[in-house]
């Protein structure tokens, strides 16, 4: 689909449909996944996450050596859709081309329960899915987590849950053991694409960029309020992290983090504020390599749109998207 058409259609639906209408129009995630797999000549692999209603689906053949684990966005309101399914395989294709096919990895994705389910449902499902993956033989250091928008928020929930456990839900697979105040082993890395941490509370960039972005201030504020209405006050810090103290110890969980956003997207300030909170901790770079990449002129989830409809002459990916490809390559090489 043409990029301009895709943005226009997405913006119209998001602005004018209720969550229930969007869910009905877009269809169930697993049904969309099976259709996507058939279209892309991939054998569907669907795994039940024990103890929950969630599933893990594979966007490549299943692997246990290197895994890019994707958590989709959609404001917790929408299912896993085609352009999101094609995002990580597009990054992989670019990396394979760059390395002559020598550096490969598998891609798994979490299909979690969407609204009206709210916290801690999604965090519980994510925690169980990661625990199951590690138990199946994938080493934590060979897992890179990548999430966009609400998916990035869910990864942030996991970070906070690991460092400051939420009572009464399954423990993070990276929690301390034997009273040692460090996680067991570190992940390979985390990529947070257009992370959403302002749920229900507009940041200045909402007003500044709503005229440019297809995900505008109105839907962002409504969706955030819908989700937060189901969150108990005692759980708010895990969903809307507002203090750098919540991230104290993050360098024991992950050695490198990439945060990306567009300069013209409504969630620009969310990305910058998240980066700023972690930077306040003044963690030495050799312990935590954290990068903020603000794409000039970019809008919400620009890389996902770029994979679907490349804008460069000849179909090449943008420099911002290729920086994600380079980052993934370096992260997997560092874990080897």
Image (cartoon, grey):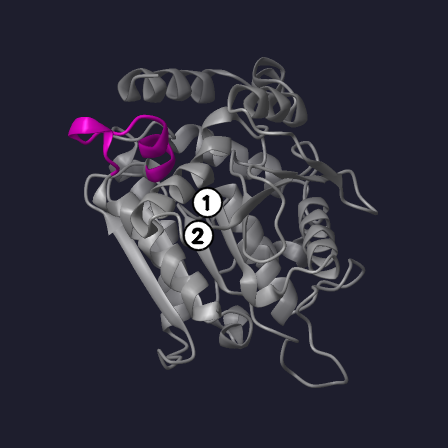
- Position in image of residue 258 (x %, y %): 38, 58
- Position in image of residue 53 (x %, y %): 78, 38
Crowding near pointer 1: few (<14 within 10 Å), some, many (20+)? Answer: some
In the image: residue 169, left or right of residue 134: right
SS of the residue at dot 2? strand
- On whether residue 312 falls in the magenta region, the answer is yes
Q: Residue at x 51, y 24 (%)?
A: 40
Checking the image for residue 145, the label placed there is none
- Position in image of residue 222 (x %, y %): 51, 31
Give the mark, 1 or 2, whose residue is nearer the N terminus: 2
Q: Main secondary structure of the magenta part?
A: helix
Question: Could you give the CA–CA distance between mark 1 and mark 2, rounded to whole angstroms?
Answer: 20 Å
Depicted 121 relative to depicted 29: above or below: below
Q: Residue at x 42, y 44 (%)?
A: 92
In the image: residue 196, left or right of residue 54: left
Camera-nearest residue between 73 and 318: 318
* Quadrant of the snapshot with the N terminus: top left
Checking the image for residue 192, the label placed there is 2
Q: Residue at x 51, y 59 (%)?
A: 241
Checking the image for residue 201, the label placed there is 1
- Position in image of residue 150 (x %, y %): 52, 42
Camera-nearest residue between 227 and 35: 35
Which residue range is magenta in the image?
A: 303-317
């Amino acid at each position: 689909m043409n990029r301009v058409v895709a943005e226009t259609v997405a913006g119209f639906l998001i602005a004018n449909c209720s969550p229930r209408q969007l869910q009905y129009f877009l269809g169930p995630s697993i049904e969309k996944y099976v259709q996507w797999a058939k279209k892309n000549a991939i054998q569907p692999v669907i795994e039940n996450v024990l103890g929950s209603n969630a599933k893990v689906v594979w966007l490549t053949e299943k692997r246990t050596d290197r895994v890019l684990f994707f958590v989709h966005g959609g404001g917790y309101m929408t299912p896993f859709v085609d352009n999101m399914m094609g995002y990580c395989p597009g990054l992989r294709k670019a990396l394979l081309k760059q390395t002559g096919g020598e550096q490969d990895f598998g891609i798994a994705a979490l299909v979690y329960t969407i609204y009206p389910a709210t916290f801690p449902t999604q965090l519980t499902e994510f925690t169980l899915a990661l625990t199951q993956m590690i138990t199946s033989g994938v080493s934590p250091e060979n897992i890179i987590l990548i999430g966009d928008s609400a998916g990035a928020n869910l990864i942030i929930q996991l970070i906070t849950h690991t460092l400051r456990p939420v009572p009464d839900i399954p423990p993070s697979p990276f929690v301390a053991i034997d009273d040692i105040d460090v996680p067991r082993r570190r992940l390979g890395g985390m990529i947070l694409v257009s992370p959403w941490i302002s749920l229900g509370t507009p940041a200045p960039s909402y007003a500044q960029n709503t005229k440019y972005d297809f995900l505008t201030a109105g839907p962002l504020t409504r969706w955030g309020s819908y989700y937060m209405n189901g969150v108990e006050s005692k759980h708010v810090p895990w969903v809307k992290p507002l203090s750098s103290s919540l991230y104290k110890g993050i360098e024991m969980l992950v050695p490198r983090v990439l945060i990306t956003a567009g300069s013209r997207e409504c969630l620009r300030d969310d990305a910058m504020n998240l980066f700023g909170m972690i930077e306040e901790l003044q963690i030495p770079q050799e312990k935590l390599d954290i990068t903020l990449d603000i794409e000039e002129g970019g809008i919400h989830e620009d890389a996902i749109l770029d994979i679907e409809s490349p804008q460069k002459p000849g179909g090449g990916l943008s420099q911002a998207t290729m920086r994600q490809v380079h980052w993934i390559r370096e992260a997997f090489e560092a874990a080897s």
